[in-house]
Image (tube, rainbow, N blue to C red):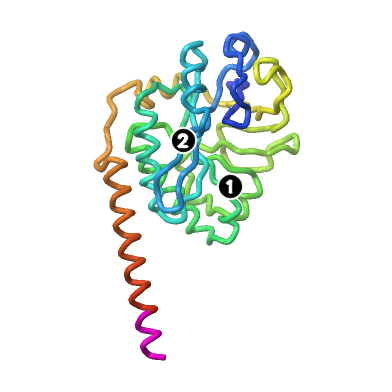
Amino acid sequence: MVERAGIDISKHQGKNIDWAKLKASDKEFVIIKTGYSWYQGGMNIDSQFLDNAAGATKYGIPWGAYIWAYDKTPAARISANCLADLLDAYKLDYPVYYDFEDEQYLKFDRVASADIIKAFLDTLQDRGYYVGLYTYTNFARSYIDMALLVAYDLWIADYTGKVGWTGPYGMWQHSAKGRLEAIGGGKVDVDLNIAYKDYPAIIRGTGLNGYGERPGGTEDCAALLRQVEALEKEKAALTAKILAAKKALG
């Protein structure tokens, strides 16, 4: 079995990353946060994403990406298209993950959560990306119908010293308290991961993540966002009508 050590980073690790030292370290890959999705589709970009992607690319450090999920409905496909538009400028040797763990989902039905995840991952996959779900053991057990997501890779977080999730997974985040001289001079915590698949070989071999022809989207991100805005306006107008009708009825 392949075992490769890596880290994941975001704006929380700051700007002080010594990419030359990271390249020379025992960490073989990095997963970079792209940002977070919106409630009804779309995304904001992490303030350090562009610099982090440029650093990893310049120093030849294999990298993948993740986005923090806030999507409330299968309109998550809009977020996925926005993310694909952003990542289409790069070639990634590691998967692109949907980070599904926000506390709002504790109140969601398990199947509804799986439907949101599936909408996102299917859309991103259709755009030519090797996709995966990120979550932690208890969340996977209690708040997501994982039986509906067996077709996708899994990056599981578990800080108990072993993986409590009994299903298949390709990567394990085993600590959030790693320290590397390359990251903030060794004074900033960073997540530590172990990959159990040869992702670079898989991804390059299948022509995904920019290593082959990109399928492109049937709808661009801007068009999808315009649709969402139009629907939100219609919803607001309908709500106003309902309130006016209730007031007229006394």
Which quarter of the figure is the C terminus placed in?
A: bottom left
Q: Is residue 3 visible?
A: no
The disc at residue 191 is: none
State the extent of the magenta-drawn residues as a range: 244-250
In x, y percent, where is residue 80?
A: 39, 41
Q: Nearer the viewer's eye, disc 1 or disc 2?
A: 2
Question: Does the magenta run of residues contain 247?
Answer: yes
In x, y percent, where is residue 57?
A: 46, 16
Residue drawn 36% across and 46% down? 78
Q: Residue furthest bottom?
A: 250
Residue drawn 64% across and 33% down? 173
In the image, residue 46 sits, relative to residue 116, either above or below, namely: above
In the image, residue 68 sits, relative to residue 33, either above or below, namely: below
Residue drawn 47% across and 30% down? 95
Q: CA distance from mark 1 to mark 2?
A: 18 Å
Specify the principal SS of the magenta part. Answer: helix
